[in-house]
Structures are given as C-alpha cells and as structure tokens.
Image (tube, rainbow, N blue to C red):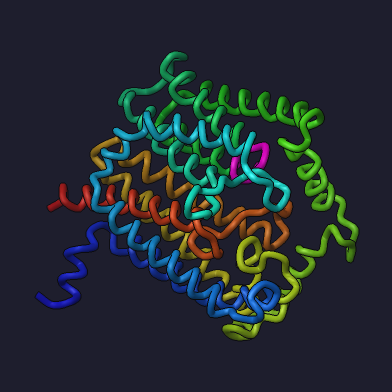
Amino acid sequence: MSFSTRIAAELRGDRVVWAILVLLGLFSILAVYSSTGTLAYRERGGNTEAYLFKHGIILAAGFVVTYFAHLLHYRRYMNWSPVLLPMAVILLLYTMMLGPVINEARRWIVLPVIGLSFQTSDFAKLALIIYVARAISSKQDYIEDFRSAFLPIIVPVVVVCGLIAPADLSTSIILFLACLLMMFVGRVALKYIGLLMVTGGVVFVLLIMLGRTFPEHIRVATWESRLQQFYSPEPGGEDTYQIDQAKIALGNGGLTGVGPGNSTQRNYLPYAHADFIYAVICEEYGVLGGATIIGLYLLLFFRVTRLITKSPKAFGAMVAMGLSLVIVVQAFFHIGINVNLLPVTGLTLPLISMGGTSLLFTCIAFGIILSVSKYIESVAE
C-alpha cells in the first residue's frame, strides 16, 4: 500500500474540509511567526522562535485532536450533550465569579497542577451547539408547539449566551446568531425564533442594568466606549489607535502585499498575533492573501452545506451546520473588525490566530464535522 493510499485510508471524510484545515494551519504558522516579533522582544528578548515553537506544538496537538475526534461516530457527541451542557454552565458561573482578571475580563480559569489558562466560553460554544442540534433533531417534524421549543432550545441558548456576555459580548452574539440560524434550518416555527430574539433582548437589557451595579463582573462601560469610538471616533485619538494602525496595514499591503515577514504594522498593532492578525496577513500578502483567507472560510461553509443535504440523520446535519456557522461567523466578525466595519473587540481568527483553547476547540469542531462527512461517505459506499 502506497503512502498516499495509507493516508487516505486513515483520514476519512470530506477531503476538501481536510485541505481547508491544513491550509488554514499553514497560514497560521506563517502569520503567527511574523506577527509575534514585538511580543517576543518585549517578553522573551527577541526570541520569536519560542512563540513559533509553542504555537506549532499547539497546532500539531489540534490536528491530532481533529484526527481522534473524526474517528468517533458523531452520534456519540449527541449522547454526551446532556452532560456537556451542565458542565459548561457550571464552568461559566465559576469563571464569572472566581476566574482571574486577565486583560480586564474574567474569561479564563487556571487549570490546577499544569497552570495553563482555559477559556471556558470555547468549551461552552461546543457544548451548546451539540445540545441545540440534539434538541432540534429529536423532533423530526416541524417544531411548532411551545413545549418543544422553549425549554429544550430557547432557555439553554439564553442561559449560556447570557453567562458568556458579561465578559465576552462578541462571542455571546456569535453563538446566539449561530443558534438562531440552526433553529431556522431546523424548521423551528418562526414565532419561536422570534421569541428567542425577544428573550435574548430582554436578558441583554437586564445585563446592562446589572452592569451599572456590578461593573467588575459586567463590562457595560467597555461596551459603551467601543460603540462610541466606532460611531463617533476622534481621528488620531487614543481610542482609534488600533483601527488606525490596521488601516495603515491594509493600505500598505496593496494587491500582492509587502511579502512574508515584512510587515511594519505588526510593531504597532496591539495583539497583532491574535485580534488583528488578519490586518497583518493583508499587509504581507495583500488583497490576494486576504481574499484567499475569506475564500477558505466560505468554502468550508459551502462544503458543509453540501454535506448536510446528503446527511440521512438530522443530528449530523444540524451539528455540522452549527459548528461551521460558529467558525465562519467568528471569522467574518474578526475580518469586519480589522477592516473597520464592526466595533473593535477581542476576537481571534479561528485556526489562524495564536491561542490555546480557542485553537484546540476549533480543531475539535473540525473533527466532528469530518465525523459527519465520514459517516455520509460510508453510507454512500
């Protein structure tokens, strides 16, 4: 058996999705190595290889996680969902009350013994998408009665998104939108999709009111300042520094970019390796590089859409759609922030930005999508 045949036998599932995973990983290595220069000089005396090595280890671990996640039959994830969701709620509550404050927000918990930080919202996103997919697929007919829509779907979505929002509003919005779209695709009656939107709006207003009393737990002041600087910016002011540097990076890039490793704005952009990595990519690889990134995320979405039309099982279709939506919507929010179409917030570019738990859970999501496609392949055979 040839090497390529052996690899093909091991890596089942949609070959295009595998290719997207690898290409995004390659872009990640190049972009992280280039964008961590300033961070390396500030924290490691200029040792950029240390960050590259660390990121490469996490990325390799993520690919291994994808491989093992795709080996499991996707219905196992459905069986685990009643346990995963309560775990996510408990972790979110613990993070909100007792998590350490990092970058003025309580988004992380520190794992004992190993001392690594863990962003609980990444786990919660995965748990909620799997749970909502299970709730929708358990009703094969059109979901149009209150009992089958409110408690099984609307309440978990509002609770989880409401717990994420105080420290990470952007992630909460992305997850909320993904669940709305899942309900629409899953043929939930429009009145209950509207009910979810109204309930989410009421919870958001309550969070704003509570934020006036508990500003250390709910970042209402941060939300207001970012909206203010987006809608009424003072050109050249401190509040617009990040987006001004991102605009310069985009302008420097032109059509083909200044070349790998030649970005100048990486030295001025805060969090160039995470929140503004797309701007660095556009500076180094130009419009063509930026369009390639967009094309890869769009291709992922269309491959999953094609996948679910072939899926004979409702849960497989719903979980693949939900996970792809979270990845793609977050990617476009990140890109929108970098090109000044959305207010600045701390969102990473999935599978490209430097990170730990975000990257690993994105790889798990890819593994579950590939598990669904592997099952469809086996049925076709």
Describe residue 35's horizontal placement relative to residue 235 as left or right. left
Identity of the residue furthest to the front in this view? 113
In the rendered structure, the answer to whether residue 164 lies left or right of residue 264 reads left
**Residue at 45 percent of width and 33 percent of height:** 87
In the rendered image, residue 298, in percent from the top left (x then y), is placed at 47, 58
Looking at the image, residue 45 lies above or below residue 137: below
Whether residue 169 is in magenta: the answer is yes
Is residue 266 something that shows in the picture? no
- State the extent of the magenta-drawn residues as a range: 165-173
Residue placed most toward the observer, 241 or 83: 83
Q: Measuring from the top left, give residue 131's x and y in whole percent.
A: 40, 33
Viewer-side residue, 288 vs 123: 123
Residue 88 placement (x, y as % from top left): 48, 35
Query: Relative to residue 92, is residue 129 drawn left or right?
Result: left
The N terminus, quarter of image: bottom left
Quarter-wise, where is residue 47 in the image? bottom right
Residue 352 in sight: yes
Q: How many marks?
A: 0
**Residue 23 spot, x, y in % from top left:** 42, 70
- Residue 176 in magenta stretch: no
Question: Which residue is depicted at the point 71% across and 36% down?
Answer: 217
Asked if residue 78 is positioned above or below residue 294 in the image, the reply reads above
Q: Residue at x 71, y 29 (%)?
A: 207
Residue in view at x 81 percent, y 41 percent: 221
Left or right of 214, for residue 179: left
Front-most of residues 344 and 310: 344
